[in-house]
Amino acid sequence: MAYRTVSLAEIKKQYNKYVESLHVDSALIDENYLKIRNFCLKEYNEIKELAKSKTYGNSEKYTIDLLLGIKLYEFLNQQESFNAKYESNYSFWRYLATIVIPDIVSDRWKIDKSAHFFSKPTAIYPFQIYWYIKLSWQGTIEETIEILKDNQEDHILQLVDRPSSIGVNVDLYRKIMKKLTTINPKERKNKFRIVMMKNTSKLVNIRPEIYPGGLDAYVDMLYANI
């Protein structure tokens, strides 16, 4: 069953409707989207409680983003209807954020932060946390959490909000994120920003796959002398 999408104009209309009513009518949500909503609601409420323990760093908000991202990534990739065409389809993520789980998005962010619902594609909340996990994935949930647990909210922004003219090299970003664990957590925020800016500039003229020594050597180069 395909996931329904609607025009951006309709998304804006539905966003304004939700802002006025703060009500989600589950009866109007398609069956496959409803499965996502029910799953996210259950996980979000449980994760909010867990986040208070500050098990992952010192930020409750980052803990929520990390763990909900993990859960959403795992859940969607278990659905027969979900595939690569939806991963990069902003219309899918706008629909999910604005019509299916707007109460979760507005609880995590302020209701007037339209960027996290629809107006800034890479900031759409479910898109952002899903892709944070996809670009950091290390093969298992446990290994992925292990390399991400000491990061901050800014790491999500720096990783996801950098579209490239040559597309997304998933293997490269996963190696960049693993290498980040060699940096002291207190220094990661600024150094990671430097690494990502350096990577963006290098990609104009360099193909990481054919860099001398391959991807690992390319990533080492990015982290050198920062």
Image (cartoon, grey):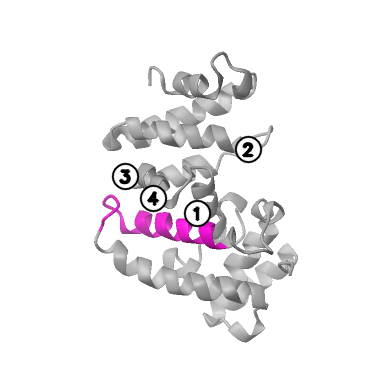
Indicate the amino acid at tag 4: Glu
Report the Cα–Cα distance between label 2 and label 3: 24 Å
Determine the secondary structure under disc 1.
helix
The magenta span reads 54-75
Indicate the amino acid at tag 3: Asp
In the figure, is residue 59 to the left or right of 216? left
Q: Residues within 10 Å of mark 2 (few under 14, many from 20)?
A: few
The reply to whether residue 157 is in sight is yes
Contact between labelled residues 3 and 2, with CB atoms less than 8 Å apart: no
Report the Cα–Cα distance between label 4 and label 1: 17 Å
Report the Cα–Cα distance between label 2 and label 1: 16 Å
Residue at point 56% right, 81% down? 24
Q: Which residue in the protein does label 4 denote?
A: 142
Q: Which residue in the protein does label 3 denote?
A: 150
Q: Which residue in the protein does label 2 denote?
A: 168
Q: Foreground: 144 or 185?
A: 144
In the figure, is residue 17 to the left or right of 5? left
Q: Foreground: 221 or 61?
A: 221
First in residue order: circle 4 vs circle 1: 1
**The N terminus is located in which quarter?**
bottom right
Q: Which mark is residue 68?
A: none
Q: Foreground: 60 or 143?
A: 143
Indicate the amino acid at tag 2: Val
Q: Which residue in the protein does label 1 denote?
A: 129
Determine the secondary structure under disc 4.
helix
Determine the secondary structure under disc 3.
loop
